[in-house]
Amino acid sequence: MAVLLLTGASGWVGGELLRRFVEAGSGPEPVALRRQRKPAAPVATVEGDLREPCLGLDRDTYRGLQQQVTEILHCAADTRFGLELEAAREVNTRG
């Protein structure tokens, strides 16, 4: 079974894509990587941080994702206009 790791699911673009995946009911099973757990998520979620090694996840969770995830869709971004370039790159590019 295909499993899709979706970053930025709580944002505008990632949230819309997540909604479409859920509504389609076919395709890869989405797992949302989020900065904070939010109640009533329509899919499985893991709380992590793109800026941290191993996504800030504990070893077992990270290994589980390594074994299951077949696709990654990176939609996480910091879109603040006043953000320093290096800080923006930390999430938007390196993440």
Image (tube, grey):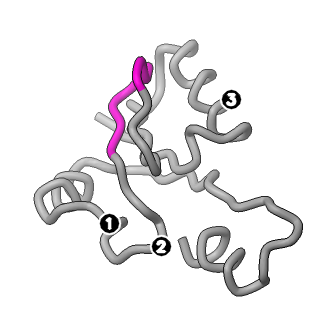
Residue behind mark 1 = 56
- State yes or no: discs 1 and 2 in contact (Cβ < 8 Å): yes
Identify residue type, mark 2. Arg
Considering only vertical position in the picture, is 56 above or below 61?
A: below
The residue stretch that appears in magenta: 39-46
Percent x, y for residue 79? 78, 59
Q: Earlier in the sequence, mark 1 or mark 2?
A: 2
Identify residue type, mark 3. Glu
- SS of the residue at dot 1? helix
Q: Nearer the viewer, mark 2 or mark 3?
A: 2
Residue behind mark 2 = 51
Residue 16 lies left or right of residue 44; in this view the side is: right
Q: Does residue 44 show up magenta in the picture?
A: yes
Q: For the point 18% across and 54% down, which residue is it?
A: 61
* The C terminus, quarter of image: bottom right
Farthest bottom residue in view: 86
Main secondary-structure element of the magenta-colored stretch: loop
Identify residue type, mark 1. Gly
Question: Is disc 2 surrounded by few (<14), some (14 to 19) or many (20+) residues within 10 Å?
Answer: some
Considering only vertical position in the picture, is 30 above or below 60?
A: above
Q: For the point 58% across and 47% down, which residue is it?
A: 8
Residue behind mark 3 = 16
Q: For the point 47% across and 73% down, which residue is it?
A: 51
Q: CA distance from mark 3 to mark 1?
A: 25 Å
- SS of the residue at dot 2? loop
Disc count in the image?
A: 3
Percent x, y for residue 87? 67, 79
Q: Nearer the viewer, mark 3 or mark 1?
A: 1
Q: CA distance from mark 1 to mark 2?
A: 8 Å
Q: Earlier in the sequence, mark 2 or mark 3?
A: 3
Q: Does residue 35 show up magenta in the picture?
A: no
- State yes or no: discs 3 and 1 in contact (Cβ < 8 Å): no
